[in-house]
Amino acid sequence: QVQLVESGGGLVQAGASLNLSCTDSKRTFSNNGVGWFRQAPGKEREFVAGINWNGGSTSYADSVKDRFKISRDRYKNSVFLRMSNLKPDDTAVYYCAAALRASFSRSTSDYRYWGQGTQVTVAS
């Protein structure tokens, strides 16, 4: 069974960068599509970025396009989210999730496994 652990969040100033990591401690999600989502206080959880099983297909929310980059290392059973030029609106708890298929989805309902989340706070 997939067990995801996120890391890399923190408190940064606007314009800074952060690298989030999502690791599957059970070493089983290398064939799954993976998505990064975020949830700000009082808001719905929203799609941020997704990557398919081999990294050949990626997609981003319009709000983060050209600032965030998703990648994966299948041998390390990890997926990464490089976040640049962070803005206060990026403040949220960030979650990674693994789908039950090789492709990713923008819908939370298509994901079976979720990490516990990592807090990202961007100060203005």
Image: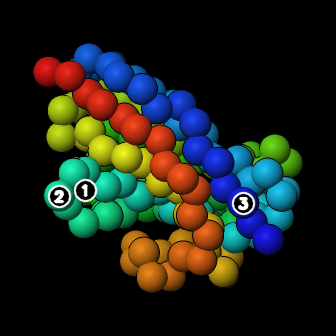
In this rendering, the answer to whether 108 lies above or below 37 is below
* Residue 117 percent across, percent down from the top left: 49, 49
Question: What count of labels does the image hold?
Answer: 3
Image position of 106 (left or right of 23)? left
Residue beneath disc 3: 3
Indicate which disc residue 16 carries. none
- The secondary element bearing badge 2 is classed as loop
Q: Is residue 60 visible?
A: no
Query: Mark 3 packing: few (<14 Cα in 10 Å), some, or many (20+)?
Result: some
Disc 3/disc 2 C-alpha distance (Å): 27 Å
Query: Mark 2 packing: few (<14 Cα in 10 Å), some, or many (20+)?
Result: few
- The secondary element bearing badge 1 is classed as loop
Disc 2/disc 1 C-alpha distance (Å): 21 Å
* Residue 30 percent across, percent down from the top left: 78, 62
Residue 28 occupies quadrant: bottom right
Residue beneath disc 2: 42
> Which residue type does callout 2 highlight?
Gly
Query: Residue at image x 83%, y 58%?
Result: 26
Residue beneath disc 1: 62
